[in-house]
């Protein structure tokens, strides 16, 4: 799951959905110490994204990233646990995975002709708050907001990658504090390698990524819905 988490932190398919729905579909046993496991995956993902972006930093991007990450950081500290308790089940996660995927695909159909503006960044900041709900995806919500504002696809992907870093670092720290144990090395390394490779791959802003991610999200949600229906009939 470390590699899956690393990729899903970058590719807009919702890492929280993958951690919940993939084990459900595959019939895997859940992790005994899920909090420590999540801390390891977040730490590895943050490291991989940082290494991928280390030569792509500038003062302006850093300032904007930190400033517009504040609402999501505050919301996460205050309400993440409650949101996960209410919306973290199999059915709500699958539903949000599909709905957010459709919204992301629809936003990407708009013309890609505008630079980053303050209104676009404000929209992305609010979208990251909505991404506290499992299945929405931080990267997916940010891309949806920016593309809905017709931000150039390359700029949208670049800003999304940069904005994911402080949020992922914060998530790693928060889960590590809750776990009260050091993250394990193997899942951390796997997540780091996968997120690094994924970030390097998508930083060009491929026009195929959003439709492909949306199709994947819809397919996974459909598989989950089918299994839930079968289980209900038993």
Image (cartoon, grey):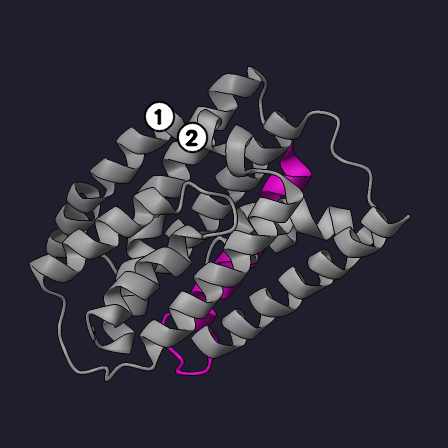
Neighbor class of circle 2 (other Cα within 10 Å; few <14, some 14-19, many 20+) is some
Where residue 45 appears, as percent x and y from the top left, is 49, 47
**Residue at numbered disc 1:** 77
Most extreme residue toward the front is: 233
User: Which of the two residues, 186 or 213, is positioned nearer the viewer here?
Assistant: 213
- Comparing 106 with 20, the one in front is 106
Q: Residue at x 39, y 37 (%)?
A: 169
Indicate the position of residue 135 as horizontal and vertical percent values.
52, 50
Question: Can residue 206 be found in the magenta stretch?
Answer: yes
Q: Is residue 95 left or right of residue 75?
A: right
Residue marked by disc 2: 80
Residue shown at the point (16%, 61%) measured from the top left: 120
- Whether residue 64 is visible to the viewer of this picture, yes or no, is yes
Residue in the picture at 22% in, 77% down:
152
Identify the residue shown where x is 66% and y is 44%: 90
Whether residue 170 is situated above or below residue 66 in the rendered picture: above
User: Where does the magenta region start and end?
Assistant: 184-209
- Tell me whether circle 2 and circle 1 mark residues in contact (CB < 8 Å): yes
Residue at disc 1, secondary structure: helix
**89 in magenta:** no
Between 155 and 114, the residue placed more toward the observer is 114
- Name the quadrant containing residue 34: top right
């Amino acid at each position: 799951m470390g590699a899956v988490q690393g990729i899903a932190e970058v590719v807009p398919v919702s890492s929280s959905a993958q951690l919940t729905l993939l084990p459900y579909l595959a019939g895997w046993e859940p992790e005994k110490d899920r909090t420590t496991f999540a801390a390891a995956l977040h730490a590895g993902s943050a490291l991989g994204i940082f290494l991928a972006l280390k030569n792509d930093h500038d003062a302006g991007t850093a300032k904007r990233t930190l400033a517009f990450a504040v609402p999501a950081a505050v919301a996460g500290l205050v309400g993440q646990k409650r949101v996960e308790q209410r919306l973290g089940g199999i059915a709500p996660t699958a539903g949000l995975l599909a709905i957010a995927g459709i919204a992301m695909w629809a936003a990407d159909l708009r013309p890609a002709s505008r630079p980053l503006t303050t209104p676009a960044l404000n929209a992305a900041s609010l979208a990251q708050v909505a991404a506290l709900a499992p299945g929405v995806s931080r990267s997916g919500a940010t891309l949806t907001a920016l593309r809905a504002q017709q931000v150039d696809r390359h700029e949208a992907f670049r800003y999304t990658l940069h904005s994911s870093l402080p949020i992922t670092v914060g998530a790693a720290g928060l889960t590590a504090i809750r776990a009260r144990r050091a993250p394990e090395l193997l899942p951390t390394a796997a997540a780091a390698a996968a997120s690094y490779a994924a970030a390097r791959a998508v930083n060009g802003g491929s026009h195929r990524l959003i439709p492909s991610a949306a199709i994947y999200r819809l397919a996974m949600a459909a598989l989950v819905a089918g299994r839930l229906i079968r289980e209900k009939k038993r």
